[in-house]
Structures are given as C-alpha cells and as structure tokens.
Image: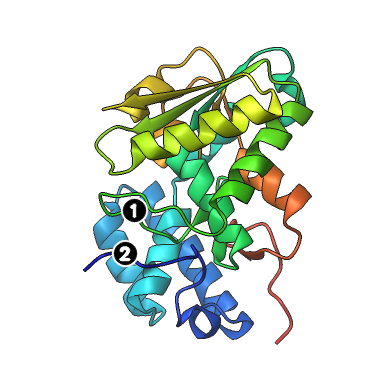
Amino acid sequence: MPDKRTHRGAHPEDDELFAATHWPALRAASADLAWLLDRGYALRSALAITGDRHLLTQRQRLAVARCACSEEQRMRRRTHELDAGELAGGELWIDGYNLLITIEAALAGGVILRGRDGAYRDMASLHGTYREVTETGRAAQLIGEAAAGWQVSRCRWFLDRPVGNSGRLRGVLEELAKRAGWNWEVQLEFSPDRLLAESAWPVATSDSAVLDRCGRWVNAACEIVRAAIPAAFILDLSGELPEPPL
C-alpha cells in the first residue's frame, strides 16, 4: 500500500499514550531500563522486564527504548557533545534523515523525546522510502537558518542511498541551499553511519550508534526545536526533571 501521509505528526493514539498521567510510569521505566543496562542486561530483555513491570504498551516501550542508554554511554556522549556556538568557521556533517525527520515531526505536532543523553529523537519510522511531507521544506529551511546562525562554513549532508527518493530529496536540499546562498554538499552513501562516526568534523545526529563512536557531535535537533518550534510536544525522559503535577 503506498504511503499517502502528508504530515510526520503524531500517531492517532499518542494523545492518550503520552498524556501527562503516563509520565511518571514512563520516567520510572526509563530509569529502570538504564539501571538494568548498567548491569549488563541486553536492551531487548531489559525492555521486556521494565515494560511488563510498568504495564507499557508497545508504542510506550518504543519511546522508552529510544531514550535509553547506560550511564557509561550517557557520560561518553555528553563528554563529546559540543555547544552550537563552537561550530563557527568549521564544517558540520549532518545525518540527513535523522535530523530532517525529527524537525518535520516537531513541526507536525509529533512526540519528540528527550533521552537520557539529552538528545532529541522522534517517534517516526522510515520504511525503505522517504516521502516528502508538508513540513519538509520548512524543516530544511530551519536547519539551514540554524547552521547559518551558528556560522558553519559548510554543511555536508549524508543521505542513505538505498532509501527510495534520496536522489529527489538531494535535489530539494541543493535547490534550497542555492536560493539561500548556503554552502551545502549533499551526498548519497550506502553507509552514512560509518562515515559520520569516523568524521573529523562535528556531527549533527541523535543516532545512538553514531553517538557512541563519533569524535564530536551537536544536539542540533534540540537547538532548533527549542529556538524555532516552541509549541513542540517534548516528552522528557532524561531523568533530569521532577514529576509533573497531576
């Protein structure tokens, strides 16, 4: 069945599944999952234990899993994180689909997760083919404006070559950069994660596998959402906030 979505917004059940009444259980599950990961449990088995304990649905478990990491991973990621103000004059390597889809989701009212490492992540999924949505152009524009504001000398975007419509998206991004006068290079690669992890330049991503290997990274999605999308739905599972009043 063809994908006919026009937005990268919330799942129909998200208003209920991620209502404030569920935040205590979601935050407790996130803390429990981190505790188990610190003790050597595999993510899959640890998630089953915490999900069953807190009676989480599959989608709630997905949210908790996307926010999870061990304390060792959290410290490693935070130690290697750069402030956006430190990007001036250099290149920024962008995990294209990772960042773009998160901004699209934030613009469309989708749930944006703040993980235990502080990174912002979305709940969307990409199944083989990328489909432009109503928010695509605005999301790319916000990324470009943010990078320009950080005085980045060049943005190098990396898109997964096997994903359908990657070539089309490259054209959209290149045309936007040309109109705005931004120095962008958009590459289609079979293994962008490997290139990003090995980059000598800072990386804009929230991909856990990249964050655990890259030299430096910037929490670009967080910076952009906070600055430009104040109405975004942020579910904070970082463990750094008190419980909300019910």
Q: Residue at x 72, y 30 (%)?
A: 84
The mark found on residue 3 in the picture is 2
* Residue 164 horizontal side relative to residue 91, left or right: left
Label 1: state its secondary structure.
loop
What's the residue type where badge 1 is placed? Answer: Leu
Closer to the observer: label 1 or label 2?
Answer: 2
SS of the residue at dot 2? Answer: loop
Which image quarter holds the N terminus? bottom left
- Foreground residue, 170 or 204? 170
Q: At which x and y percent is residue 241?
A: 70, 62
Q: Amino acid at mark 2?
A: Asp
Vertical comparison of 182 with 241: above or below: above
Q: Does the rendering let one see residue 72?
A: no
> Which quadrant holds residue 59?
bottom left
What is the number of callouts on the image? 2
Of the image marks 1 and 2, the number of the one nearer the N terminus: 2
- For this rendering, which residue is in front, 223 or 131? 131
Where residue 9 appears, as percent x and y from the top left, is 52, 67
Q: Which residue is mark 1?
A: 126
Mark 1 closeness class: few <14, some 14–19, many ≥20 residues within 10 Å: few
Residue 39 in the image: x percent, y percent? 36, 49
For the point 39% across and 38% down, the residue is 168
Q: Position of residue 13 (x, y in %)?
A: 45, 82
